[in-house]
Image (cartoon, rainbow, N blue to C red):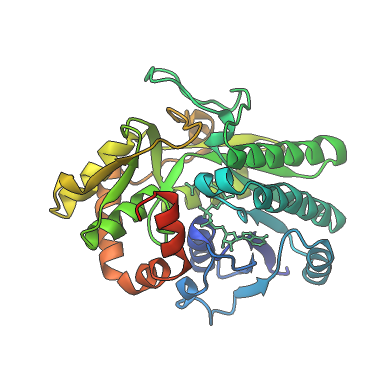
Amino acid sequence: MSKKKIVVTGGAGFIGGNFVQYMVDKYPDYDIYNLDLLTYAGDLTKHKQIENNDNYHFIKADISDRETIFSVFEKENFDYVVHFAAESHVDRSITDPEIFIKTNVLGTQILLDAAKHIHVSKFLHVSTDEVYGELDFDPTVFFTEDTPIQPNSPYSASKASSDLLVRAYHETYGLPINITRCSNNYGPYHFPEKLIPLTISRVLNDESVPVYGKGENIRDWLHVYDHCSAIDLVLHKGADGEVYNVGGHNEKTNLEVVKTILGALNKPESLIKFVEDRLGHDKRYAIDPTKLENLGWKPTYNFETGIAQTIQWYLDNKEWWEQIISGEYKEYFEKQYSLK
Ligand code: NAD
């Protein structure tokens, strides 16, 4: 039997990068293709340990470039597509929405066309709980797969649009698909513009940590390794056409997260700097993962252990994030939070 070929788009980013490593290690009998444009959010240094493995391959390509994507798909004839590639930062989508539409909407449509063209066995679209909009602070209410799609930011609107296209290709053309909608991830190789790595990297340099509004917004945090195992399960066992929510019941306010990190690193709370709230800032996200649990998934990390290991990872891998925050990113950061 020939080896299964899996193309992972966005495999040089945070979650896709962890997923590529997970798959290369777990399935030596699969060929894993990391297809990525290497935007500001992607880098291959994270794959040093696997780059010489026989079952790892890298393809530099833009998912919104139809000709290139079709020629790659025709040449490689993939069995599965696991689609992570996206513009992923809400703040950037508020200042410059256009690239979000190009990559997240048009890029997804081109991948769907290419996947249909070569008759893949599954197209797994990695999405976010943000497509459901926001919840209020009632702790008994969660997003389920039946919650209406009501995105509030340009980012979540672009992801919701791509989700609907994936659904439409299933309904119209019978393309075998799954959609996963996950809560906020944290863990190794998280790009330092996002709350947890931003806080860790700033605090380690004794720099102020910007917190939007009063820091009361609630996010449901999941360790990236638990997200990887969820996607693996849905890829192999997900029922055709189904959506699965992924979350670990770890709700925290942004302020709680920042204070946890300050406490773990023995740094004073005076480093917290409250800044003007994000436009349209969703109050609360919280996932009901029952459907995925019924398929056989269970998260293995609790937040306390996961965050402690993540902080340790950032201490052990300073060269990775220091190189990022010293470049173009520094300018972006100062402008974004009006810190200059
Ligand atoms: P990321 O920004 O860290 O990585 C995105 C990757 O996509 C980068 O490697 C980038 O180079 C690549 N990319 C961007 N545009 C591309 C293009 N045109 N062609 C090819 N590659 C391109 O993102 P992430 O946080 O790892 O998120 C990955 C996916 O998971 C996204 O689809 C996101 O919506 C979804 N998601 C993220 C979270 C989270 O907490 N980060 C939660 C739920 C879902």
Instruction: Tell whether 69 sits left or right of 333.
Output: right
Instruction: Tell whether 196 sits left or right of 304.
Output: right
Tally of numbered tags:
0
> Percent x, y for residue 58?
63, 74
Instruction: Tell whether 262 sits left or right of 130.
Output: left
292 in relation to 29, above or below: above
> Percent x, y for residue 188?
38, 60
Q: Residue furthest front?
A: 340
Taking depth in this image into account, of 77 and 65 the one nearest to the observer is: 65
Which residue does the image show at 70% across and 38% down from the upper left? Answer: 161
> Percent x, y for residue 151?
60, 31
Ligand 1 quadrant?
bottom right
20 in relation to 152, above or below: below
Taking depth in this image into account, of 132 and 275 the one nearest to the observer is: 275
Q: Give residue 16's quadrant in the image.
A: bottom right
Q: Give residue 310's quadrant in the image.
A: bottom left
Q: Considering the image in quadrants, where does the C terminus appear? A: bottom left
Which residue does the image show at 13% across and 49% down from the upper left? Answer: 268
Which residue does the image show at 60% across and 54% down from the upper left? Answer: 84
Which residue does the image show at 42% across and 51% down from the upper left? Answer: 194
Instruction: Tell whether 163 sits left or right of 286.
Output: right
90 in relation to 312, above or below: above
> Percent x, y for residue 323?
39, 73
Q: Considering the image in quadrants, where does the N terminus appear? A: bottom right
